Image (cartoon, rainbow, N blue to C red):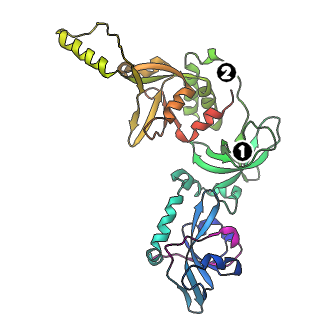
Amino acid sequence: MSIKYSEVGFRAFYHNFIAVPMKDSLKSVLQDFSGADKANYILTYGYIDHTVGLTLEVLAAAFRDDKGFSFEVGNKEISSKIRIGNVMDDECFYFDDEDGSLYKRYADKVDMLKSYSEGDEVEESRNMNFLDGSRSPEYPDDVLVYLLKDGNKPEGCWVRIEGLAEHEIIGTLLNEPDQNFDYHEGEKIAFYAQQTEDKEILLCSNMNPSKKITAEDLEDGKMLEAAIHTFNEERTEDHLLDIMEILRDSYVWIPCNAVISDVDQARLLAMLEEKEDGIIGEEFVTHGETRLIPDILQNGDNFFFPVFSNEEAMGEYGKSFSKVQKHFLEALALAKNNEKDLAGIVINAFSEPYVLEKEIWDLVEKMKS
């Protein structure tokens, strides 16, 4: 089946076998392959390089005549690539490979392309058809996002998709805005889809700063709890931003396991042996260093770093731990440096919880106070 990239878009080429016509500008990419001298097509396999866009990996020289296509053996030692911009308007041929014969023949080369995977969330974003009107033709992971801030004109900037939040998409700004939005090239932003009166889908990022929140407002953790309750009742972008802005300036409680030195452990065991009636009520002063290690919660295969708006929110769970209060950004740093691959930070896990997913941690740090 013949197709043109400029007409069908990236999905027909992505993870598919495609024959592109040989032309002078492409001869060099096939020069180390068997049958290059007689080829009039090039067999390729389409994949997305997150940085340089839709790319075709050269698999073999191809020859087309009135009987159809024939393909030469590949070259496992050479990786040769065609960026999609070189063939966007060329008539190419798509092969569905229902029997898997092409994959079996060139599996070594195709399997190597798995190293370009950007994870499940970026992969999921490539299936979001509503983003297509904003995508760069050659770079499917790059979308045009309009930055919105009071006092500024809406400004379109290119953003590379990096992950998904519950109601937003996370991406990296690829160019420096002309106006002052307090965000710069290379920094992560959150954006969302909005439909205009004409049914057009635009991608927007709200960059308005929040109202000033004082330390007194946050002292007892009730404002954070109220924001989480509001978000759970109505999961909107504005309510999500409220949580993130409150977290940015909050102090939270962290349950920790106390780990004492070997010397102190030996002293404690000696006390237990000496006191036949137990040591409840006895005073024990450590001489060595005592380390406080944050507890980690597990839900299925996922691990979460628990923090609490106040000590009361820990409930019965908190009675088993030492507790420390830290600024949320300090807690965030502890979560980032934890030895486990955390899925997120869970706030008030045993009352009305909210999970700050790992993909948006950087956004909390970036938000202006």
Label 2 and label 1: CA atoms lie apart by: 28 Å
Q: Is residue 316 above or below residue 12?
A: above
Q: Is residue 211 visible?
A: yes
Mark 1 residue type: Glu
Occupied quadrant, residue 47: bottom right
Closer to us: 269 or 82: 269
Residue where numbered disc 1 is placed: 185
Q: Residues within 10 Å of mark 1 (few under 14, many from 20)?
A: some
Q: Quadrant of the N terminus?
A: bottom right
Q: Which mark is residue 120?
A: none
Q: Main secondary structure of the magenta part?
A: loop
Left or right: residue 62 compared with residue 265: right
Q: Is residue 76 above or below residue 177?
A: below
- Span of residues in magenta: 74-98
Occupied quadrant, residue 34: bottom right
Closer to us: 278 or 38: 38
Q: Earlier in the sequence, mark 2 or mark 1?
A: 1
Report if the CB atoms under discs 2 and 1 are less than 8 Å apart.
no
Name the residue furthest left. 276
- Residue 35 drawn at (x, y percent): 56, 86
Mark 2 residue type: Ile
Residue where numbered disc 2 is placed: 213
Left or right: residue 233 compared with residue 281: right
Name the residue furthest bottom. 66
Q: Is residue 32 above or below residue 124?
A: below
